[in-house]
Amino acid sequence: MPLHNDQHIKIYNTLSGKKEDFKPINNGHIGMYVCGPTVYSHVHLGNVRTFMSFDIVFRYLKHLGYKVRYVRNITDAGHLENDADVGEDKISKKARLEELEPMEVVQRYTVDFHNVLNTFNFLPPSIEPTATGHIIEQIELIETIIKNGFAYQVNGSVYFDVHKFNETKDYGILSKRKLEDLIHNTRELDGQSDKKNPQDFALWKKAEPQHIMKWPSPWGDGFPGWHLECTAMSTKYLGDQFDIHGGGMDLKFPHHECEIAQNEASKGKAPVNYWMHANMLQLNGQRMSKSTGNTVNPAELLSGNNNFFSKAYAPSVIRFFIAQSSYRSVLDLTDAGLLASEKGFYRLMDAVSKLEKLPSGSTSTIDVQVWKQSCYDAMNDDFNSPILIAHLFEAVKYIHQIKEGQETLTDKDLNVFKTTIKAFVFDVLGLETITKTEGGNDKLSGAVELLIKLRQEARANKDFALSDQIRDELAAMGIVLKDSREGTTFSLN
């Protein structure tokens, strides 16, 4: 029997502004769509945080036994520099500046995107469609919206008529914005003269002669609007209505708002039951920005080649750091925070490494089932990974107590305990045991083992002052020595 029959998830739905009981459209099956990257540059850490949040959601739903179709797109055309439908296509601009074909730019940064996510141990989505691979579907969608009276053609471009839509629908339902306020706060921008109203958005843009990326359409050569792409791809693979749509908080308006409008205008129904938005990532208390220099990319963080952090950090340490914050909270990336997470990560992994050597007893002095359900309760509460991690550290305490004989578990309970810890640490959180070549662990182990040997020699020579000094100074650095009849071992505290 799948676990989801006994576990009841609540999801914070941006649409309603509250946590709601999660009920899939089709029992045992989940359709989930997450807006992927526009591949014109290296993926930044804010993107990594967003995609990691939904990777954990995906992992947990799979762990519960749901059959999940996870669709995450690649935007490889149509994303202009300005949400008001003006400016140059981001990929075309990059291609022009670097004197490359646009698809060379797309290939380069798509490969980079996959490499970065693989480094952080992401599961691949079920389907990863591209905008350029779905031009036909987008043209058909535009034709339906025009037929239904919610779009108009002018000078080779097609625009969505927001005012017409708002007569019978609610444009702003997701972001809680009123069209009247949008009208009041809108200023005219160059290049918008074709629109009936500044709030209207492009479904299809006419391509100027110099535009590199363009396709034939009933309205002339052009390219699709950015908002349209996700509607076409999500509904093709997940149906006119599906369970979960995710993305960064910055996409809530106008991108996701426009997706809702397009779906209602073409299909006559709202596309998504649960809208989830991951919050932003800050660097040292300030917004990440290339213009101010307050930014660091994944490669720089992993290598230590940057001006913000004291050292390099392993991918799983960074993943652990991100999981220690709710996906809906602003997360501040700092050196102190990463150092603390690194310490906690090694403490957790050290405890996990001791699991297989734990002895069983004739009785259980720990209620494993209560502890196990507390882990599920945390994730069932809007995927609350920080609370889950708190329960895992409760398990770390139990591991040390069992090892020292202060607590006991029967064979059956010990097996449940081990299985649950491994499932949440590796399968759900997606953490990996760091090998000796990562983070300098081989050098650390060698250095500590040498100091243990010197301490043993000092004790044999009755030089207890030196022996205590070695132990105390290692402890001050977070390296705890444990003496037993079998010898001396160490752990990272």
Image: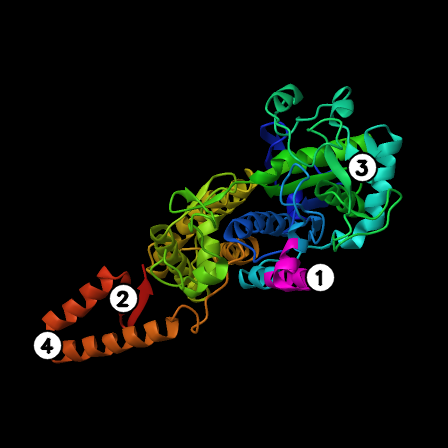
The image shows residue 305, relative to residue 136, as above or below, that is below
Q: Earlier in the sequence, mark 4 or mark 2?
A: 4
* Residue wearing tag 3: 158
Label number found at residue 103: 1
Report how far apart the C-alphas of labels 1 and 4 lie in the structure.
72 Å
Q: Where is residue 145 shown, x and y percent of the image?
A: 84, 34
Report how far apart the C-alphas of labels 1 and 2 lie in the structure.
58 Å
Tell me the SS state at disc 3: strand
Tell me the SS state at disc 1: helix
Q: Are marks 2 and 3 in contact (CB under 8 Å)?
A: no
10 Å neighbourhood of mark 4: few (<14), some, or many (≥20)?
few
Residue range of the region highlighted in magenta in the rendering: 93-112
Tell me the SS state at disc 4: loop
Q: Earlier in the sequence, mark 4 or mark 3?
A: 3
Query: In the image, is 468 to the left or to the right of 396?
Result: left
Tell me the SS state at disc 2: strand
Q: Earlier in the sequence, mark 3 or mark 1?
A: 1
